[in-house]
Every structure is written in structure tokens, then in C-alpha cells.
Image (cartoon, rainbow, N blue to C red):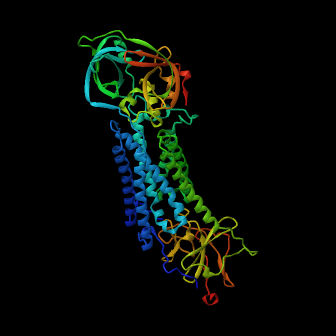
Amino acid sequence: MSKTPKKDEFFVGYNAKLSSADRRAMILTAGIGLVGVALGGAKAAVHQQGWGSGDWDMGEVRDIEGIVEQTPYPVLRTAALDGQMRSVSLVCSSKCGASAILAPYEGKPVWVRGTVISRGRHRLLAVVDNQDWLGDAKNAVAAPPVEEEYLGLAALNGEILDAKCWAGAMRPGSGKTHKACASLCIRMGGTPWFVAKDKAGKRAIFVLTGPEGEPLREEVLAMVGEPVRASGKLMRRDDLVQFRVDPAVIQAV
Amino acid sequence: MSHQFTPVQWNGFKWRYDAIVLFGTILFVAVFVGLTMASRQPGESLAPVQILIRAFGAAAFLLLNIILSIGPLARISARFKPLLYNRRHMGVWCFSLALTHAGLTLMWYQGFSALNPVVALFASNVQYTSIAGFPFESLGVAALILLAMLAVSSHDYWQAALGASVWKRIHMGVYVAYGLLVMHVMLGIVQEEKAEFYPASVIGLFCIVAGLHIFSAFTGRVTDRRVKASLDGWINIGPPDKIAENRAKIVRTESDARIAVFRYDGKISAVSNVCAHQNGPLGEGRIVDGCITCPWHGWQYRPEDGRSPAPFEEKISTYRVQIDGGMVYVHPDPLPPGTPTKPAVIDEAANV
């Protein structure tokens, strides 16, 4: 005679009956699995790096007056935000550029309606592009000449990214997972910034332009969102510092 | 098994199984989102959508690793076989999580522009020759398409329509999807995050899945050697009492076919070891209510003719058997599926 197991257990799913040993094994497996899942979720959460401090206050729509300047990207030179003369970058609320609509107003006093995106000392105004957001200024607007200063040559390590994303539209708005988004934003008319970091992690923000201060878009798309090294001139225009580089010398690191 | 297909034939086990999977998913997402919010540094501002993108992506990837581990675990220990029964629900759920991750990603990162988001996804980054800049999203899209095909075709209706062999081959595509997702994660979030935890976790999970498959294949190979037929063409598989009652011994022939030789009610019958449903190992099954019952999903066949009991119509190959000199012999040439064969009757007196 063959040896028949004392308990020849066999699970058939549609019977939905587990032997007591199988039931114990399944309960143990489920318990270990759920504890593992919870621990995995916890570890995956706490090891993430910082998300940045940017903010987009979409709840408060503001009308700001100033002078339009588009060299090389749209800004509103204004004293309205904090009382000092500032260059506030003008960006779309969606992924587009405001340059075409602003072109007739170049150098003119205007009012602009939008919401403020801010990170540190950097301020952007996301224009409310689903309604009237631009017109001739209703009040007298101070228009001192642009202060321009050559600051020297620099070779910097950092990342090219979209100003609006990094400043608060996306959190985080940098790095590999954001690369395609930043590339799309810049392609569609966003403002490219160069976020430089030294070895100590200290950060400096520059407006990225061509060698003569011209706008860059298609030329830098391949390098957006990656660690890169670039060398060029630093030029201050009012309170913004431009990093003027030949896109051909931007290298992945 | 039935020709009257219903979306899901629920029972208590399935309900409990799915409830635990759902609870595990909610637990993972809740812990991830909660601790991400709780562990942020002062002044940091989080985008909830981006937290959810990460949470759902991580949940889908973890679940796929669990799904792929169940098969080899069940081969290593029969205790894990109940996990196989409802595994396809986990697969569909895994696809749903991946789809949520992909949908949120597409909306958040590629939406809000004049370009179609799908066009934008593929046009925004085309650095396929760069490791640092590789558009890892395309790997995720390819994996998602594969997972969608598997989820849609997971129902028994498609299995019956396509045939077990074609269906099984299509569903082996889950390994291609897994490979794509490993690369998607490694070239995406792992490149971005600095903590060693992330590459270590992905590589660790991959090693567990690969290790379980290799181990189960190795242990199976030890007991799965080819057996030569004797000069008269029959294979000697030993005395009947080496086969447990209502169980089978599996024989691998020189032509690489596997035969399940069952002992039941004082008789011996042999059938193909391959279930018509999902190619499950019938020889690891049991005789239940007079029928060979597959250990994977419980499909049944009569041992005498390899046919499913009415009203079902599935058929598997049968093999001729005989007992001579106290030894069981099986002929390695398969008979057409569903062919009645005479069981060999065990002479108990001769076996003592």
C-alpha cells in the first residue's frame, strides 16, 4: 500500500476552503506582507530629498503696474510688490510664453493682472491668461533706466530649469523626473534659469541667455533638467543676474 | 472552464484576498503620503499631485514584485499555492495603480500647454543616447501598454478564445513589462533622489524576484530529470505504492513532455501534466470528486479520458499505462486529447 499522508491537504480556489495549516500560513503571509508594505512606504517617504520652498499663491489675484521689458525674457520693472524697484518675471499660468502679447507694450507703462509665484527673493507674476490681464497703466509709473553691470567670467555647475516650475509651480520643479516638464515649458515660451550649486550646496540663480544676452530656448532643451557645467559672462540688469553662455559649451557632468 | 463567462466568480476566499490587497495598497499610499507630509522641512512646500504620482508609482512597482514572486514561491512550497488562485486580480489592480500614476504624470507634467500631452511626452525629451538624460517615461509607457494588454486579456474568456498556449505566451510579457519598469525606475526617480535606499531597494527587489525564479527552477530541475523508455518503448516509473493515493508522479520523457501518472481507487491512469487552462502542473494536483484537479485554479479532468466533466468541454492528452511485475509502466506517446484509456488495475495482493 502507498503511504497516504495523514492530512492530504489540497486547496481548490472555488471551494474557498483553506485547511487550518494553509489558513495559518496565509494569515502569517498577509501579516508579514502588510507590515512589509507599511515599512516600505515609510522608508520610501522619509528618504526623499527636500522639495524646495517655492509657493504659488493662486488665491490672491493682483494688479501690478510697471514697465514692460523683454530683454531677453518678459519682465515687469516695478516698485509695486515690495516698494523697491524689482524685475518681476512675467509668465503664463499655463505652459506658454507671454512675449507675443507683451510685444506691443515693450518699454511702456502697463498694468498686469496675475498671481505671485515666489521662492526666496525671487518673484514671478503668472498672468491670468483666461481673462483681460494687460492694459495701459492707470497711474504714473516710475521708469528709471536699467542698471547694467558686468560682473565677470564664471564657470558654473548647476541645472537649467524653467523659472516658473522651480519657483513654485512644481514642487519639486527640478531634477530628472521633472526634466520633460521643464523642457516642455521652455519650448513653449517659459524662461530658462540656471540654478548653480557649489560643493557646499550653496545656491545661486541666474537668468540664462545667449552670449549677447539673447533668449535661449531650443538650443538648451537637450540639457534641461540634468547636471551641467557651463562657462560665460555674468551681467547684472537691475536686480536680475544673467548668465550669458554659448550653448555649445554647456556640457553634461 | 465554463462557456458561460461571468466577470468574476466571487467567493469568500476571493473577497478576503482582494480586501487584503486593497487594504495593503491603501496602507502603503497612506503611509507614504502621511510621512512625506510629516517629514518635510520647515518652509518646504509640497505639491499634493506630485506626492500622489510617487505614491501610486511606488505602489504599482512594489505590487508587481509581489505578483511575480508568488509563482516561484508556490513552486517552492505548496503552502503558497492559495496565493496563485486570485493572482490575476492583483495584476489588474497593479495595472490600475500604474494607470493612475501615468494619468497623473501626464496631466501634471505634460498638460496645460497647447501641445497634446501625449505628443508633449514624447517630444519633450528625445535623448535616447544619454543615460543621464534618457527619457525614462517612454519605458513606463511601454510597460503600461503591456500591462494593459495583460489586464484586458486576463479573463478566462480571452484564454478560451486565444487558447492556453497563446494566452500563456502573451502573459509571459509580464516579465518584459517588469524589465521595462525596473529601468523606468532606475533611470527616473532613482537618478533624481540621493539616498542609497532607492537603488538598494530596486536592486534588492529585483534580486528577490530573480532569485526566487532561479531557485524554484533549480529545485524543480533536480526532481525533473528525463526518463528513458526501455527497449519496448514503455517507461518504468516504479511500483504503484510509490505514488500516494489520489496523487500523481510526474515523469519527464525524452521528448521533454511531462506525464502525470495518478493513483486512485486502486487504479493507475496517466494524462498530460499540462492543464488546458493556464498550463498548470496537473501532476501537482489531486483527485477530487473522482477528477484530476489542477492545483492552480481547480480545473478538473477525468483520469480515464482526460475530459472535463459535463458541462465543460476541455480535453487533455492521455497515455497508455500497464502494470507488469509489480511495476507501473507508461507509454510516452500521447493519445489525442480526450481519448479514453483503460486504467491499470493495481493488484493489491501482488503489491504487498
Q: Residue at x 36, y 24 (%)?
A: A91
Tell me if I can see residue B120 in this picture: no
Comparing A42 with B128, the one in front is A42
Choose top left, top right, bottom left or bottom right for residue B328: bottom right
Give the vertical position of A87 relative to B45 (above or below): above
Q: Residue at x 38, y 40 (%)?
A: B50
Q: Residue furthest top?
A: A145
Q: Residue at x 49, y 13 (%)?
A: A212
Q: Is residue B308 left or right of residue B255?
A: left
Comparing A162 with B351, the one in front is A162
- How far across and how far down the image is residue B295, in percent? 51, 68
Comparing B114 with A138, the one in front is A138
Comparing B80 with A85, the one in front is A85
The C terminus of chain B - image quarter:
bottom right
- How far across and how far down the image is residue B115, in percent? 43, 30
- How far across and how far down the image is residue A235, in percent? 44, 16
Tell me if I can see residue A203 in this picture: yes
Give the vertical position of A29 relative to A229 (above or below): below
